[in-house]
Image (spheres, grey):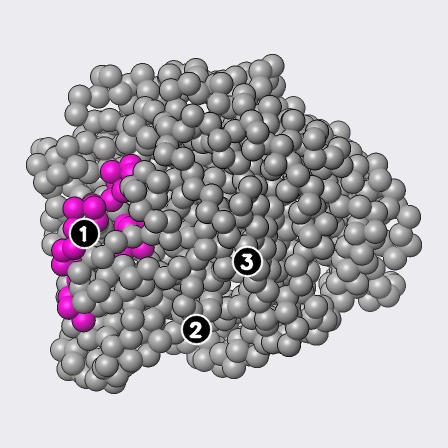
Amino acid sequence: MKLAELKEALASRADLADWRISETRRKGAECYLIGDRPDLGRSIEARDCQVTVYVDQGGGETRSRGSASAAVHPTMGGRELAALLDRAAFAASKSRNPWYPIPGPAPASFAPPASGFEGRAPEAWSAELLAALYRAEGRAGAARVNSLELFLTRSERRVLNSRGVDAAWTSWSGTVELTVEAEGSAGEVELTDWLRFSEPDLARLEAEMAGRLEAVRDRAAAAPLPALAGLPLVLAESEAEAILRWFFGNLDAARAYSKASPLVLGQSLHGAEAREGEYDRLDIRAEPGLPGAPASAPYDAEGFPLASLGCAEGGVARAFHGAPRYAHYLGLPPAGAHALFSVGPGSIPAAELRSAPGLEVAYFSDFDVDLDSGDFGGEIRLAYWNDGSRRIPVTGGSVTGSLFENRGLLRLSRETALAETMRGPEAILLPRVSVTAAK
Amino acid sequence: MPDCPHSAFLAERKALFAQAIRILARRFDYVSVLGTDDAGVSYRALRGETSAGEPAWVQRGFVLRAQAGGRVVETAFNEGLERGPERLAAEAGDRLAALLAASPGQKEYPPLPDEPASAEFRGVVERPGLEADPEEVLRRLAAFRDALLERPDIVAASASAEFVRVSRFFLSPRRDLFQSFEWGQAYCFGVARRGEAAKTSYRAASGLAGAELLDRIEADIPGLAEELAELLGAGKVEPGEYEVVMSPDVAGVLAHEAFGHGVEADMFVKRRAKAAEYLGKRVASGIVDMYDGAAGVAQTGSFLFDDEGNLGTKTLVISKGILQGGFSDALSALELGAAPTGNGRRQAYDHKAYARMTNTYFAPGSATKEEMLASVKRGWLLDRLNSGMEDPKNWGIQLIVLVGREIVEGKLTGRIASPVFCSGYVPEVLGAIDMVSGDFELTGSGACGKGHKEYVKVSSGGPYVKTRMRLG
């Protein structure tokens, strides 16, 4: 099924008020290694296509719109496609939601620079990327790579709709899932983590791996987490991102429309009880692109052009990002569904956040932040306990807390860093947490 | 009830691939193909809207595996079939050969076995979800949502259902397998808020089942509404170690995280499984039996054959507290010199096969839930699993549950905590199991990842289990 045939099939149907096609052509290379030896080689070449149909009913004040989506496989023939579109149109006709428009054509306001990977096939990069990832191992003493998986994919995205949108862009996505290990007094320990990247930044890959090898050495030397009370929690990287994503996620128009979000435009993100000087005000922007982030894109999934959008300024909610449909429902200007966000720097150097007595958790088993309740926590795989004079690696136990109890006391570091989907404070501090000892 | 039909698309392409396999077999020591055509529908009712779509599990594509000189390579694709078997075999063969040429130092495995097998399976469900009337499904989901939103403290609610018809064939020179079956799952989810206190909970139903799941969810809505109202008064557990009685869904995830991931045979190959040191040794109390298997029970982790063409089996992982062994994908079985257990599973045709769980559960015991509660001096009844995470090398475990009910001197006090973070050291947690109920219930409404990706449908559960864990 070619795109032109699909477009023609959709355009010929009188029962559809609108339609959208999202197509992705993927070419990927994958390497699986145990130690430093390749275990399995794989290649992927695929075309994924999703169609969404919209059916309107009624008119005037009672006009409603229903939608249904379905995958159009490239191996589908004309008869199979017709049956699929019949089913989708019928299902769409059974949803009667308040009417909303779909995006029309608009120029991109953000043009992501071509990735440095462009010009070579994914598999042609494998050797260089692996060499960079393993370079730090030679300097890591007792720490080593247990196993590693490398994925590099080039994707050509295209979004078309019945209102004239025809947006296309190319992206590169690299992922490394890695397990590092080191010998401790009680036997071997390991840490599993992942990296995501969109540029052949070999120095970054080497540094990221070196950091993880150092961390697993620390875990090998870590003591069981003792009973601690009254100490603040310091988080960095993906855990800091997860905490700050709670604010970004609740600034989504869809969550505001469903009333799941506790955040209200014009009100403080830090709560009414927050006292001046006791917290760093959040500045949050929805971003179409961040250098090095694979999710950078000039358009959202509906073909709406993305631009940098100030969602919170000076700690006050100013705008919702999200799918244009929900902005329409809320009577707000459409902003598009951003995957990325940035958070402005805070007032305190990261070194200072870490220098006071506290618990900095570097690795959780699985750090969980509940978007609805604001509860967060996880079991600790590696943390550093600052007892006022020493930075002691500890492991085991868990930490829990609530964002509603911490948002008025949140501290952000002055330095910023790139996490997977955020550029924001390198470290953050949450003072009100509960710690469960390892034993 | 009619048998689930095979994908007509796959049935029509079987001969094409059988021919391509014969051609490729001249070029490689081993060759096989997995063909997938998993169809599905999903329905959602959120506040003020309903919609229909397809679950993320929908896929149609092929993965060819080849072995030459011991090295194993794969190529995945989802188009280019119209050019015929010779061209398909030539192009895919060239991609496989290029992968072999690019990796001269790659690990060499013993020859992949290709024992003769020919089998077919077509599942049966009461009311096939793919044929359910969209209007009826959306109307019922909207009614579930609205029943929750009628409560003044429930600020957000959703109801959803998805039905997937799995259809896959596996062909090699000597194997010809075809299976088609349907599974479904339905959820209701609510958020209660009063002031800054916000709590969530859910109900889920799942199984090798279709639209009949909506009846099961509907019966659970009043209980969910009551629970959400109760949770607004929830406090926190004072950090410490407690006696805990786990509901079947929480206990099942304990099994899954503790000795499910820990005995995946590819973890043994990577020396990531501490369990390797404990084969034949005690890892749990003497009343613990634990199983994993696609065969033997009917839930979302059940199938006839895995994604590498090995028939599903049932593995006794722990017998009377003694670790018996694990389960494998084809390559880890080869490496360990063991028979494959049929646990080689892929997220989709374009993903690698790993050793994965299927249906993982504790076997029932002889106690009753009431006897278990009565035996607790100071502890918590844990229900409504949120998530779990394993640590196969170092045997840490994390479970997050949404509902903890305090037990003092054998009685529920009415005090409730949410969420409850549970952690512990696996042998200590399993070693402290002193009561197991006679109940048996599997839940298959979640998905299992390997590390942080590679999601497959699984189920877990069993009986109520009483043990000790650290809570916070």
Q: Nearer the viewer, mark 1 or mark 2?
A: 1
Image position, residue B269 (x, y; %): 29, 38
Q: Residues within 10 Å of mark 1 (few under 14, many from 20)?
A: some
Q: Residues within 10 Å of mark 3 (few under 14, many from 20)?
A: few
Q: Residue at x 33, y 59 (%)?
A: B315
Tell me which segment is drawn in magenta. B259-287
Tag 1 and tag 3 share a subunit: yes
Query: Visible in this render: residue A230?
Result: no
Quarter of the image where one finds residue B159: bottom right
Q: Nearer the viewer, mark 2 or mark 3?
A: 3
- Judging depth in this view, the residue of A295 and A369 nearest the camera is A295
- Lower position in the chain sequence, tag 1 or tag 2: 2
The relative height of residue A99 versus residue A419 in the rendered view (above or below) is below
Image position, residue A345 (x, y; %): 40, 31
Number of marks drawn = 3
Could you say whether the residue bearing mark 3 is in a helix, strand or loop?
A: strand
The relative height of residue A298 versus residue B397 in the rendered view (above or below) is above
User: Given the image, on which type of amino acid does mark 3 rest?
Assistant: Ala
Q: Residue at x 82, y 66 (%)?
A: A62
Q: Which residue is mark 1?
A: B279
Q: Is residue A392 left or right of residue B423?
A: left
Q: Residue at x 36, y 27 (%)?
A: B107
